[in-house]
Amino acid sequence: MSNIIKISEAASLGLHAMLVLAQEPKKMFSGNEISKRLHASEAHLARVLGQLAKVGLVHSTRGPHGGYLLGKPADEISLLDIYQAIEGPLVEINCLLAKPVCKNGQCVFGGLIHNINHQVAEHLANTKLSSQQVS
């Protein structure tokens, strides 16, 4: 079955990795440990965590006792912060096609695309990492 909302694997991995770190904020997690918990490629995870480190959402330490920690308290990090660190700014779209083709500005979906994008952006912006849990 197709999904209406598409989130890249990198963004999903970043969101879930941050949830793992938030569960034990004082614990240094190795990339291997996080990748095993998320059943993900350690190499892909390292690239994603590198992007999160560039914007200060994650602190990374190299070496045998190194790993990853949250860069700031979970209650100061929104899901939108994480998403945008990986994907860049959220761009509002009102059409599923590259160039709108509907006549007279009357989209076959009405205002649904705009409303869904607005709701997703609002949810991400208003949801703090501290309010989420890893199952």
Image: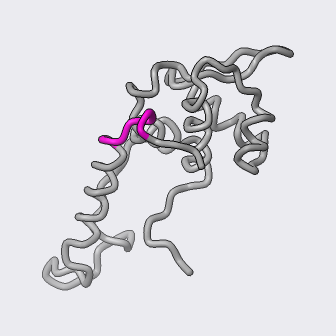
Relative to 21, is 72 above or below? above
Q: Residue at x 38, y 69 (%)?
A: 98
Q: Say which residue appears at 46% left-offset and 42% top-offset.
A: 132
Q: Report the quarter where the N terminus lies.
A: bottom right
Q: Position of residue 113 (x, y in %)?
A: 28, 69
Residue 86 vs 50, above or below: the answer is below
Q: Residue furthest left?
A: 104
State the residue in front, 103 or 125. Answer: 125
* Between 117 and 32, the one nearer to me in the picture: 32
Q: Quadrant of residue 48?
A: top right
Q: In the image, is residue 59 above or below residue 113?
A: above
> Is residue 128 toward the left or the right of residue 36 in the image?
left
Report the side of 107 relative to 9 (left or right).
Answer: left
Q: Residue 85: give x, y in percent of width and height.
A: 48, 35
- Identify the magenta region: 125-131
Residue at point 38% right, 73% down?
Answer: 97
